[in-house]
Image (cartoon, helix red, strand yellow):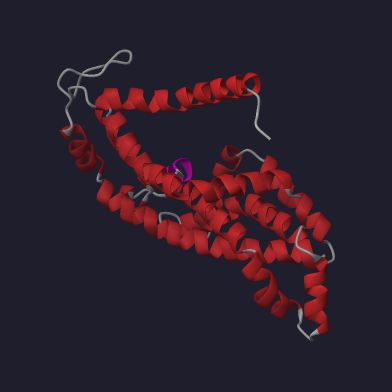
Amino acid sequence: MRTPTSTRIPGVALLLLAMAFSIFPLLSMLCTALQPQGSVPLGLSWPSDPQWHNFVDAWNVADITTLAGSSFLLVLGVVPLGVLLATMAGYALGQLRVPGGSVLFVLLLLGLTLPFEVTIVPLYYQIQEMGLLNTRLGLILPLIGLNMPFAVFWMRAHFLNAPAELSEAASMDGAGAWQSFRAVHLPLALPSIASLGLLMFISTWNQFLLAIVLMDDPAKRTMAGALQNFVGQYSTDVVLLNAGSLLIMAPMILVFLFFQRHIVKAMLAGSVKG
């Protein structure tokens, strides 16, 4: 059935407005990044002589090559293990209905409501007591833990909506809980797992505060931590800061462009399940 024009016009207008709100900050940052270094641009204006070399200078000043490698190592440490743990926990809570599962799920939901910033100080002293301060492992473990409430909630929603007949049929064929999980439920959960992996990748890549607090060595932080390199003792180079910010955001924008269909599907699935 074709949507009437009177209904489509408000929808298109709202979409254009939302698109403008999304694009305007990026356009403003691009205009600022192309201004002469040391200047303080005001407003949104395209420079008469764009300084494209600012991106090269920002890359070198922030040492983005080193930080990109560090971010990839952190992502490789966080995402596979986090997705595995969340998938197994989601299966246990959604399909096996383990004793005490409801209590554990409520505790996980409380973790979702807890502001991330209030955990920074106790987390710092705990990691210090474990002797993991200023190590990548000391950053990977908290990142996995911080992702767990949302990740388990996500995978539990998938397994909760999986047909119970699948487990019953596998059980009649002699499969145990582990075999049913590995051979039946895991292949069907691959779209949800892939979506969760993408979201955890974005969350880990953009991590700034935790990397600054738990890691003294700037070379072992995330790419987002490179923003600190543009802040001097007495001033901040606004032009290079914007150029560096665009370089740091570029991988996330590319990931979104390549996987936007999966991300949108994941968001829609997460909004209706559970």
Q: Residue at x 60, y 49 (%)?
A: 266
208 displayed left or right of 48: right
Q: Does residue 135 appear in the picture of this structure?
A: no
43 displayed left or right of 173: left
**Residue 6 shown in magenta:** no
Residue 121, given in percent of the width and then of the height, sits at 55, 42
Instruction: Give the residue furthest to the top.
Output: 42
Image quadrant assignment for residue 73: bottom left
Residue 77, given in percent of the width and then of the height, sits at 46, 62
Q: Residue at x 25, y 26 (%)?
A: 239
142 displayed left or right of 159: left
Residue nearest the observer in this picture, 204 or 19: 19
Instruction: Give the residue furthest to the front.
Output: 1
- Above or below residue 76? Residue 241 is above
Q: Quadrant of the N terminus?
A: top right
Residue nearest the observer in this picture, 168 or 207: 168
50 displayed left or right of 95: left
Q: Residue at x 80, y 68 (%)?
A: 96
Q: Residue at x 78, y 71 (%)?
A: 166
Tally of numbered discs = 0
Q: Does residue 206 appear in the picture of this structure?
A: yes
- Above or below residue 126? Residue 250 is above
Residue 247, given in percent of the width and then of the height, sits at 31, 40
Q: Which residues are magenta?
A: 208-213
Residue 120, given in percent of the width and then of the height, sits at 55, 43
Magenta: predominant secondary structure element? helix
